[in-house]
Amino acid sequence: MSKIAILDGDAWVYRCGGAAEHTYYLLERWSGENQDQLGVYPFDNYRDAVKRQKEIGGTLWSRKEIEPLENCLQMVKTSLENTLDVLGIKDYRLYLGGRKNFRSDLYGDYKANRDSTPKPKYYRDIRDYLVGKWNGIVCEGIEADDAVAIDAIQFGPDRAVIVAVDKDLDQIPGVHYNWTDGRSYTVSPREGLRFFYEQLLSGDTTDNIPGLPGIGPARATKALADCETPKAVARQVWQMYYERRDVLGISDDDAQRKLIDRNASLLWIKRRIDDTHPFWKHYEG
């Protein structure tokens, strides 16, 4: 049975769109009264430019250069073709996020940290290209991640290869391929479920989903390391939320249940269109 690549198309929109835009920084230095130019120093990134400015002074300027649209679309085409060639797969499905997303209805601040980040200039052009030339499917009500996961579960680990950059899809068991670094790896059902519960403790800063204060990914992994069963993991998560009720601003079991339920619903990547997170099944099981 032939393999099928399940592609998270949003990654190509942002990665290739961003790669078509180049911002350069110039640090200028002038002498005192005569305003003679002492030097112009080019930098490829803002951090290095600011560091040098603090050392020698001067005025910092930025300049953005954008490649022609045809170059950007060629970059997308080449990247997709190379990815499928490396995998040795011809059959694929490609998904793009739509306007509506149930997570935004659950939590008004979902991805609010991205509001100030401008989309690539060619954002719409790349999406139109992926839909028109690569049969991209625009998701409504769910995210591209959910659609990728639903297909991956439906086709099964023997056929599906999840092609993505987003770490959230590490919840999904099966074969994964990261096209930006060429890394291929397999996620077991236990590893996928454990990753979800670790996120329930640490949150997801990329999507602005809160976790427990002071708990990052490393501490979350350590906190669950000795839990052997899904029930033990869920009970440990409950206990850690319980111990931080004061910091979380909650005072009783009902409030804690609502908070965990919301965070779990935000973090859980759907396996079916009507899928819900398994926390309470594990906690009470």
Image (cartoon, grey):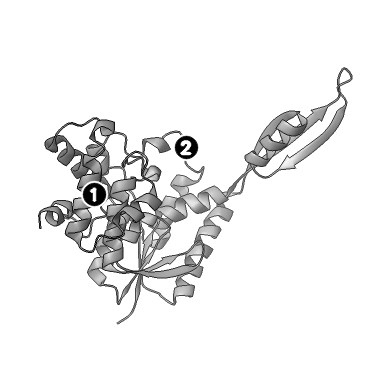
> What amino acid type is highlighted by mark number 2?
Thr
Q: Nearer the viewer, residue 192 or 105?
A: 192
Q: Quadrant of the N terminus?
A: bottom left
Q: Nearer the viewer, mark 1 or mark 2?
A: 1
Question: Which amino acid, by three-letter code, is at mark 1?
Answer: Val
Mark 1 in CB contact with mark 2 (< 8 angstroms): no
Q: Which mark is residue 237?
A: 1
In the rendered image, is residue 272 in sight?
A: no
- Residue at disc 2, secondary structure: loop
Q: Is residue 59 visible?
A: yes
Q: What is the secondary structure assignment of the residue under circle 1?
A: helix
Q: Quadrant of the C terminus?
A: bottom left
In x, y percent, where is residue 250?
20, 32
Q: Is residue 131 left or right of residue 52?
A: left
Residue farthest toward the bottom in the current orientation of the protein: 1
Specify which label sits upstream in the sequence, 1 or 2. Answer: 2
Residue 141 vertical placement versus 182 (above, below): above
Q: Residues within 10 Å of mark 1 (few under 14, many from 20)?
A: many
Q: Residue at x 50, y 52 (%)?
A: 15
Nearer to me, 197 or 240:
240
- Distance in Å between CA atoms under marks 1 and 2: 33 Å
Quarter of the image for residue 43 reads top right
- Residue 162, image x, y percentages: 36, 66
Would you say 251 lies left or right of 138 here? Answer: left
Is 202 or 163 nearer to us in this picture? 202
- Residue 152 position, x and y percent, is 28, 66
Residue at mark 2 = 117
Q: How dense is the environment of label 2, judged by Cα within 10 Å: few (below 14), some, or many (20 and up)? A: few
Which residue of the protein is positioned furthest toward the top in this rendering?
33
Residue ID at (67%, 41%): 48
